Amino acid sequence: MTCTGAIADGKNYIEVGLTQAVGRFKISGMGTTQFTCDGATYAWSAQVPGDNGRFGGGKAQLSGRAFACSDTACAYAEFNRTVTLKK
C-alpha cells in the first residue's frame, strides 16, 4: 500500500475481516494493523484470530478498509479479495 497526505505518525490503520467456509460452518475473525503514511510503499500484515474456530488451509474471503487522516479530513479505501490460507 502507498499513502500520502495524511499525518505520518497519525492514527492510520487497516482493519480486516476474514471468513472461511469449513463444511457447513463459517469461521470468521477480525484484525487490525497500523501504518505510516509518508509516501513510501509498504507491505502490510495483520493477525486475524478466528472468533468461532480455527482457520484451516484453503480459500477464504478477506475484506477490509484502510483509514488515514490529515489535520483536516480523513479518507478510507475498501478492498475485498479471495486469499488462500496455508496450514
Image: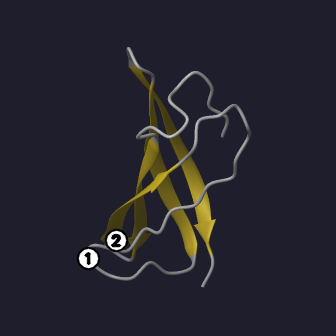
On the rendered image, what quadrant is the N terminus found in? top right
Residue type beneath disc 2: Ile
Which of the 4 image quadrants contains residue 64? top left
Q: Name the residue under label 2.
A: 27
Residue pictured at 51% horizontal, 62% vertical: 46
Q: Is residue 65 rendered to the left or right of residue 29? A: right
Q: Residues within 10 Å of mark 2 (few under 14, many from 20)?
A: some
Q: In the image, residue 30 lies at what x, y percent?
A: 35, 60
Give the secondary structure at mark 2: strand
Q: Is residue 83 rendered to the left or right of residue 17? A: right
Number of marks? 2
Instruction: Tell whether label 1 touches label 2 (CB within 8 Å).
Output: yes
Residue pictured at 65% horizontal, 34% vertical: 38
Q: How crowded is mark 1: few (under 14 residues within 10 Å), some or many (20 or more)?
A: few
Q: Residue furthest left?
A: 52
On the rendered image, what quadrant is the C terminus found in? bottom right
**Which of the pair 69/18 is nearer the observer?**
69
Residue pictured at 43% horizontal, 67% vertical: 20
Work out whether mark 2 precedes mark 1 in sequence or the reverse, and give the earlier one. Answer: 2
Q: Name the residue under label 1.
A: 52
Q: Is residue 69 rendered to the left or right of residue 36? A: left
Q: In the image, residue 61 lies at what x, y percent?
A: 48, 56
Q: What's the distance in space between the residues labelled 2 and 1, CA to CA?
A: 6 Å
Where is 60 relative to 78, above or below?
A: below
Q: Residue furthest top?
A: 72
**Which of the pair 1/36 is nearer the observer?**
36
Residue pictured at 60% horizontal, 59% vertical: 83
Residue type beneath disc 1: Asn
Q: Which residue lies furthest to the right in this view?
A: 41
Where is 26 relative to 17, above or below?
A: below
Where is 72 relative to 67, above or below?
A: above
